[in-house]
Image: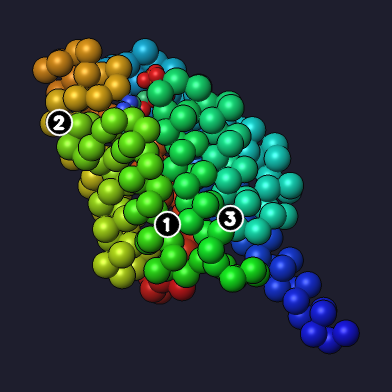
Amino acid sequence: MAEATTAADTAAGEAARRRELIEAAAGAVVAHADELTRLDQAIGDGDHGANMKRGAAAVIADVAAIAGKPWDEALKQVGMTLVMKVGGASGPLYGTLFLELGKAFATLPPGTAPDRAALAAGLERAIAAVKARGKSETGQKTMLDVLAPVAAALAAGEPAAAIAAVAADAAAATVPMRAIRGRASFLGDRSIGHMDPGARSSHIIVAALAERFAAPDGATQ
Ligand code: ADP
Ligand code: MG
């Protein structure tokens, strides 16, 4: 009986942790929707804020059911929700990112939370899937220009605060880039001088998650 209680407590703790992370990331997207709209108005069609807000709100609306599932299934459901709700170019791409991350975690022993190594490997796999889906690479002024350096910093063992800083710098570094993929590429040189909306949304998500992984002294838990 004592062992069963312990297992149940652990499962409840894991579900609460998933809920905390989902609400942090999705809540940050909702809070920054207007900023994402403005960025997409400058070099796209102005829908990135509304697209991402719709997807994040759908995930939040379903958070209890999603968080109640194991890590792999929870992430797959986040991905499927984003595919269905976000739309635009970013919906299938963010959907792929989370779906693949979930698939990567399917090999974890049951009841095990992904550690840093699993997260780094899973993110690398998920980024490869986004690249395949978007026929894109880093350096083309997209979300990949934030996601790839974040994966590298994670693999290198950087603490959470440093990973958030890497994401911020990487988003800022898309400003002088010329867009080669996505709607902004239609503008050619006129895409230069503006931050990529998808790079900024990736930064927002990474920063919100990193904050939840940072201990008060800045060490990564
Ligand atoms: P849409 O461009 O269809 O209006 P959104 O505005 O929601 O869709 O998303 C735009 C963002 O999607 C871009 O800022 C960019 O970061 C990302 N994006 C677009 N196309 C690609 C691609 N082929 N590969 C990677 N990311 C892409
Ligand atoms: Mg758009």
Q: Which residue is mark 3?
A: 72
Q: Amino acid at mark 2?
A: Met
Callout 1: 10 Å neighbours few (<14), some, many (20+)?
many
Q: Position of residue 176 (x, y in %)?
A: 13, 31
Can you say which quadrant of the picture contains the N terminus? bottom right
Outermost residue toward the right in this view: 1
Type of residue at label 1?
Answer: Gly
Whether label 1 touches label 2, CB < 8 Å:
no
Q: Nearer the viewer, residue 117 or 157?
A: 117
Which residue is under mark 2? 177
The scheme the figure's colours follow is: rainbow
Residue 164: image quadrant is bottom left
Q: Residue at x 70, y 40 (%)?
A: 62
Q: Residue 122, which numbered label?
A: 1
149 left or right of 37 in image: left
Label 1 residue SS: helix
Which residue does the image show at 78% across and 72% down from the upper left?
A: 8
Would residue 109 be found to the left or right of residue 157 on screen?
right
Q: Residue at x 19, y 25 (%)?
A: 180
Residue 73 location in percent, x, y?
63, 51
Gap in angstroms between the C-alphas marked 1 and 2: 27 Å
Residue 107 point in image, percent of width and height: 53, 63
Ligand 1 lies in quarter: top left
Q: Are marks 1 and 3 in contact (CB under 8 Å)?
A: no
Label 3, residues with CA under 10 Å away: few <14, some 14-19, many ≥20: many
Tell me the residue at 29%/44% (across/down): 146
Q: Secondary structure at mark 2?
A: loop
- Which of discs 2 and 3 lies nearer the camera? The answer is 3
